[in-house]
Amino acid sequence: MNNEGIFSIWAPEESPWSPWAKPVLFAHLDAPSPQFPTAELPADLSWLPAAENRTAVVLDLPGPEGVIVGTALASCGYRPVPLYNAIPLPFTARVLDPLGAGRIAAVDILPIVSALKQSSAKLAEITLPSDAPPAFLLDSNRHGEGRTMQPNEFDNRSICFTTDFPSANFLYAHGIQRALLVQRSRIYPLSDLAHALRRWQDGGVTLERARVDFSEAPQPLEVARPAWYGVMFQRALAALGLRRASIGGFGAWVAAASAGG
Amino acid sequence: MTTWQTHASASASRGIKDKDVSWLRAGPAVDPKAFSVLRRRAMLEGCKWDPQVGDISTLCSFPLMMRRNVWERLAFQAECLSAEAAVAEEEISRRPDLLGELGLPRTLRRVLADGQPLTPAAGGVVRFDFHYTLDGWRISEANSDVAGGFTEASYFTSLMAEHFPGLRPAGDPAAAWSGALASKAGAGGTVALLSAPGFMEDHQVIAFLAAKLRGCGCRAYLAKPEQIVWRDGVAHFNTAWHCGPLNAIVKFYQAEWLARLPSKYEWKYFFRGGKTPVASPALAVISESKRFPLLWDELSAKLPTWRALLPETRDPRDAPWTTEEGWLLKTALCNTGDTVSIREFMKPADWLKTRLAARLFPQQWLAQRRFHSEPVMTPLGPRHVCLGIYTVNGKAAGAYARLSEKPVIDFTATDVALLLEDNE
């Protein structure tokens, strides 16, 4: 199946959430890339509300785990919506295989690419209603945390923006008044995601949190006002001459801002 | 064919002489199923990776249609603007006192004023943003240093044109730009395309250009400026995916941000003293500054086209923007309209912050007389039009058209294909 076919499985025409599916990884799917073994489906989904409860789920999980859990959630009536927003490698040729065994990119996206390909067949077998609630998929490693980036690596770290998500009004219009943040080994959202969640919270969406590595019922989540909240932050701050810190702060990682005019 | 005429009659009733607006109209929407396929192709083949911004779908399913003679006139004006800017930039670069007025970082001013030879240009692309107003066509700014919109202006527009036999794109700026770069880099040349990490809307631009460069026979790699190593003024890659000298660099990375990098990255070579050709040209940041007009009276260059098309621009200390409604404020290095500040479209608290910033740092701001944009009637209702007309090495090369519900073009604007129809 080509990349268009796979993208159509993950972002079908009939789903109201498909416009938010990020195309960048799918644009690279036609390239030969390494196959990674398929991970086991999560055994415990006890934290997952029934789809009839109309909850939006945000899976902020490391690497391909979001794809794996998202596919499992599809079996439970949720529509997985990939929001991966990083370029896998610095090449424009349709070849994704790394040149050698060494690491090239700051964030290893190739396992996610592989998981999207491998899970598409399973997802295609699942018939979801067009109004299935969304499960947004993010890579919690997107900031490149947990390791020191080498100067010669491709800097494909990424952040998510409030504009990567539908508004609280849009959620409401589709009968969704609750959102559940699901993470591994974390309680509070990453700084960039906090902006999006806070915006939902301000719009009247009730937030909850759960962990895939800790079996418990969803807990209430109150997102504190993030630094620079409400500013159309990245570009506006850049224009004002402010710079993000290399550690912490709203963007929490890169020192430069967007340039396009 | 149903079209949506502009408010030409309203313009006429106000005694507007320029009737060009009647030659600009929205065409019919492409069939939804066909448009869905088109949108998908733009995303998967054309590097349009931000087709949705919040609740807004950023690609319009209908084209904007313009008479060829109107386009030819605007294209000619863009070429004049480009030529005049190049002369003025050169003159300003020899006047350190004037460089200080542009709102540029001090470190960058120091490098621009340096006596070393300019780093050779790999070519120059400028996008002039034209708006149709009650007084005819006007420009709001020039994007000389870092101009985006190539995939929308080239790939998306060509896909739309397939649905409108008899209409043609105004050009293919990505092809013109990549062709110019490839000829500079040489056959099989290696080109680095630089952008800030983390911003998909920037990555998509350089990824699209890189694919075009590969089509021209170049080897094209994405990177960030810190990964360029300068040896005797020659740029090298020293990365995990390529090591060796570069034949050309495309920096999709604003000059003032380069200037904020630590000096160990030797970013000065992007402007002066380098031997590897760099695009955009070193002096492009001069006309990129929205305070560029404040220097015109100091120059021997006359800039007649700029004077005719750009609204009156003043230092915020010299304009009555606090008491008169007819002014807007923006920063000298405003990107994508983020800091364009018009009191009536802002929350009081935001306007207060803008006022404070303009008073505290007036040298980084400017006041510009507002023009009154004439909306075009579209299937979505009245929309304000911004035509970003590209020049590549001084020649008009196509247009990036956007529509906005409000008379300010910012990140919420939607992309629309500009197609030309023959004159009657």
Image (cartoon, coloured by chain):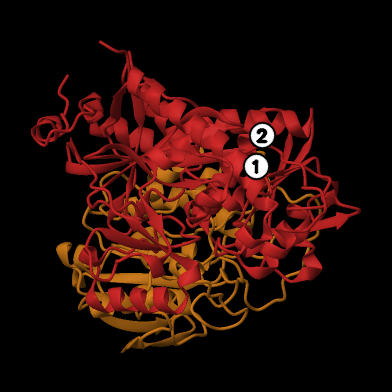
Chain colours: A orange, B red
- Say whether residue A53 is visible: yes
Q: Is residue A213 left or right of residue A92?
A: left
Badge number at residue B213: 2
Label 1 crowding class (10 Å Cα cut-off): few <14, some 14-19, many 20+?
many
Q: Residue furthest top?
A: B424
Secondary structure under the numbered disc 2 in the rendered image: helix
Q: Depth check: give the residue in front, B361 or B175.
A: B361
Task: Give how far across and how far down residue A228 sits, in percent.
Answer: 42, 80
Side of B90 relative to B379 (left or right): right
Q: Is residue A260 among the parts visible in the rendering? A: no
Q: Amino acid at mark 2?
A: Leu
Badge 1: chain ID: A
Task: Answer left or right for B27 relative to B43.
Answer: left
Relative to B336, residue B38 above or below: above
Q: Amino acid at mark 1?
A: Thr
At x 64%, y 40%, the residue is: B210
| Residue behind mark 1 | A92
